[in-house]
Each structure stands twice: as C-alpha cells, then as structure tokens.
Amino acid sequence: MEHLFRYAEKLSDMTLSEKEKEMISSAFKPKKLRKRQYFLQEGDVCKFVGFIIKGATRMYSVDQKGNEHILRFSIEEWWVGDSESYTDLVPSKYNIDAVEDTEMLVTTFALMQPLMAEIPAIAKMIRTMDQRSYIASQRRMHASITMTAEERYDDFYGSYPQLLQRFPQGMIASYLGISPETLSRIRKNAGVKP
Amino acid sequence: MEHLFRYAEKLSDMTLSEKEKEMISSAFKPKKLRKRQYFLQEGDVCKFVGFIIKGATRMYSVDQKGNEHILRFSIEEWWVGDSESYTDLVPSKYNIDAVEDTEMLVTTFALMQPLMAEIPAIAKMIRTMDQRSYIASQRRMHASITMTAEERYDDFYGSYPQLLQRFPQGMIASYLGISPETLSRIRKNAGVKP
DNA sequence: CGAAAATTTGACATGACTCAACTGGAGTGG
DNA sequence: CCACTCCAGTTGAGTCATGTCAAATTTTCG
C-alpha cells in the first residue's frame, strides 16, 4: 500500500492523514496476475481499476483479421482499466492482460467514489492523472497524424525508453500502428543514421 | 452566461445557486473572435480558456513543410485552449483560430481555480469534461491505429456529422491525417458503396 | 465581376503492408 | 542438461494505399 500512498501524495502535492490512509487501505486489495493472464476481456464491463506495484500490462483490441492493436502500456505506478467502459458502464472493446507477472492494488469504482469525495488528495490525484492522460494522448495523436512510421518510432524511443526495453518489439510495432516487419526494418536502419 | 450555467448544470447534474452563478459570472467575460483571428499562437503560453457560445474554432500545428495538422475542432458548448500548455505553463506547440466568427466566454486559470475549489458543480463539470476528452481521444487514437483512411472518414462521418457540415473538407482531411486529394477521392467513391 | 482559395482530377512515386521463407533464442519435457 | 519445438524477429519480393505534384474546375468572397 505504501506505494500507492506515496504516489497519491506526490501527484496531489498533499499529505495523507493516518485516517485517510486507512480508508484507502480498506478500499484496495492486492491482486496478482500471471504473465498472459487477463485483467479485462473484451465484452465485459470494466468494474475494477488497478494500480501497478510491479509488472507490466497492455490494453489492446483485436480486429476481424485477428490482428492485435495496442492502445496502452502500463508499468509500475500506472493505472490499469478501461475508463470508457467504467464511466459509461458499457462492455469494453478492449482486452487487458499481463505482459509480465504483475502485482497490483485493485478497487472498484463504487469503492473509489467515497475516497474521491472525502479525501482531497485523492480527488486531486485523479484530476492530475486525467489531465496527464489527456495530454499524453493528445501528443500521441499528434505524432500519429504528423509523422512517418520512422519518426514515430524515434519519438517513442525518445519519450519512453523504459517501455522500449520492457515490451517485445512486436508489441511496440502494434502500439505505433505499424507492422512488425516495418519496425524491424526501421531498427536496422537506425544505426546508419546521422 | 446562461449557456455556461446550463452546461455546467447539465454536466455536473447539480444545480447552481444564485451566489455561485455570480461567482462564475465575475470570473468569465465575453470575447468575440473574427473568422481567421487567433485565440492562441504557437510559442505563447496558453493563459485563457474559452467556452464557445456561438461559432467554431480549430487547434492545429504547422510542420516544417508548412502543412497544417488539425488536432481538434470546437463548436458551441465546447471548450477551447491548450491544456498541455496551461497545466505545465510551457509554450504551446499549437495554434488556435476561429473558423467562423465566434463568441465565447473566457477566463484565466487563476480565476478558474477558486471556482473549482468552491463550487462543487464546477469541479464535477471539469472532471466530466476531462474524462470525456480522454475517452474521445482514446477512440480517435484507436481509429488512427486500426483503420484505413476510408474507414476513418466513415467513422468520423458517423460520429460527428455536425462537424462535417461545418468545416471545409480540407480541414477534415487534415484532422483525419490524410491529404485533401485522398479525401476528395474517398468522397467520390462514397456514393458508389453498398 | 474577378481574383483567390478550395476542390477535383490525372499521372506518377513511394512508404508501408502482406506473404512467405529463413534464423535464432527461449522455454519445455525427457 | 540436451534435444526439440515454437515463437519472435529478420529478410526478401511483390503489391497496394496513400502521398505528391501539376493542371483543370468550381466555389467563395471582396
């Protein structure tokens, strides 16, 4: 739990009282996922959110041809869940599964509500998270509209080197919206550049 | 101002007291933009947010070759501003200008803070907006990774018919990340389909 | 009405995809 | 611990979607 407290205090720039920490503790519980295990499957309504203590997950959709398209990676100190599904209570279009063995703290939205209402630090943390997510996603969109496959890879390389080392190349390709073959070729040329 | 009150009440699902309405009124002031007039220029820090009463704006970047890439359209009841720039107080990478003569209510972030802190409906409105923005942007990202140019156009057509009628075709192309020529060809084929 | 901008059309170039074959390393079971 | 399988990644060849450039046409707006 300490991880989560520290994260909330950092993002909110506030301090949590012991009582608040207890409230939080009682709302979350630990959960482990084995590699390849699902956190959420397409068609289910997402009822849980998780905060990763250790490990890595991905969120992706599968198209008619069976190709996977990764929308989001998460590692330590990131949140997991499909906000579209839980805010509107609709079945999710996405799958979320563990890419490594993963430990997280999970809660439900129902349990989250009172925390948000009664703990200012949590409310602020969530606002900050929402903002950051939106900004990140706007950046990614900009990259997607503006850049070629190679530029997008370089951009990703510069922005998220940790993720690059942590996820297999095929998944990175999927995240960037290019084929694994194309990414392989881009990487081959990479050394040859300026 | 009435527009804004109604919007806040709708999104928050709460009622504003007269006192709260006064607070809001004193924080916002009306502003008009002529067609083609800038609301924000690249390199400036975005210090204002606007709520559109009437009109339409776009947010876009310009690349080295001088091509414009539209990241966002806004029309009545939408907000205008670069959240990346104002939350982190960094110079914006984007321009925002009016596509039609536009009337808005504007405020600064400094003036917005107390409203958020003291008016629950405003806090909730903002949270809802943030969530929706993120969801919309995730959808768009998904479309961008998953679909061909033609599918993206159809998707846009289905999701935002109002925008289609309101913005010139070249801007729609830019928003979708395709060339104006390609969009023109897609539209020509559109009638011929199923 | 006329100039400038937006859209359309055509011809051509190319980035990225697909399919298929090959390679190497990781994980598994004997 | 070795042999075997299997999957991820690489490489090559051919194709297709989309971009580019340029000219023709239509629309917009002063």
Image: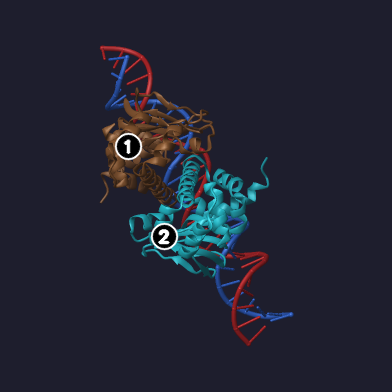
Chain colours: A cyan, B brown, C red, D blue
Q: Which percent across, then down, holds residue B164? A: 30, 38
- Image quadrant for the C terminus of chain A? top right
Query: Is residue B181 in view from this perspective?
Result: no
What's the residue type where badge 2 is placed?
Tyr
Q: Which percent across, then down, holds residue B59? A: 42, 34
| Depth order, front residue of C10/D19 | D19
Element on which disc 1 rests: helix
* Residue name at image x 48 percent, y 60 percent: A24
Q: Which residue is mark 2?
A: A94
Indicate which label's residue lies in the foreground, 2 or 1. 1
In space, the residues marked 2 and 1 are separated at their CA atoms by 41 Å
- Image quadrant for the N terminus of chain A? bottom right
Q: Is residue A152 above or below residue A171?
A: above
Q: Which chain letter matches label 2?
A: A
Q: Which percent across, then down, holds residue B155? A: 33, 48
Q: Is residue A4 above or below residue B112?
A: below
Q: Which mark is residue B149?
A: none
